[in-house]
Amino acid sequence: MARPVGRSVALVLGALLAPVVLVLAPRDRASVIVLAASSAGAAEAVTLAEGAILARFGEFGLVARSDEPGFAARLYGAGAMLVIDGAGRGGCLPQSQPS
């Protein structure tokens, strides 16, 4: 009996999370938020993926962009932990924040 319940729960979770994943999925030629273990790790991933850093995003992330297709896949290959759609944040955020 536990098996059918587990499948039902997985199906419901998948149905609830699918729209979120679609909204946050990075798009080619758009700003993305790159999260890594540190901002230095995120910067290294952006550099290795041949992108441009637009702004900082908290302690562990950066807003970055590349005009070449497949940027998100290259970021993951370069060590990024999470890459999500930046929703235009690169144009609104300052390059660095005073400490």
Image (cartoon, rainbow, N blue to C red):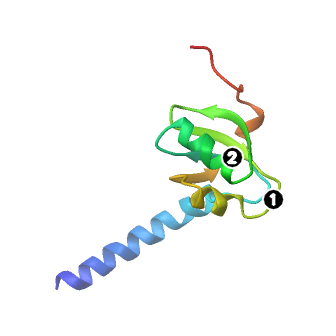
- Residue 86 x %, y %: 67, 46
Q: Quadrant of residue 19?
A: bottom right
Secondary structure type for disc 1: loop
Residue type of the residue flagged with mark 2: Thr
- Residue 41 x %, y %: 54, 42
Label 1: how many residues lie within 10 Å, few (<14), some (14-19) or many (20+)?
few
Residue type of the residue flagged with mark 1: Glu
- In the displayed structure, does residue 34 sit left or right of residue 53? left
Secondary structure type for disc 2: helix
Compared to 48, does 61 lie above or below? above
Say which residue appears at 66% left-offset and 47% top-offset: 46
Say which residue appears at 60% left-offset and 52% top-offset: 84
Which residue in the structure is indicated by mark 1? 68
Q: Please report whichever mark, 2 or 1, sits nearer to the chain's N-terminal start.
A: 2
Which residue in the structure is indicated by mark 2? 47
Say which residue appears at 80% left-offset and 55% top-offset: 29
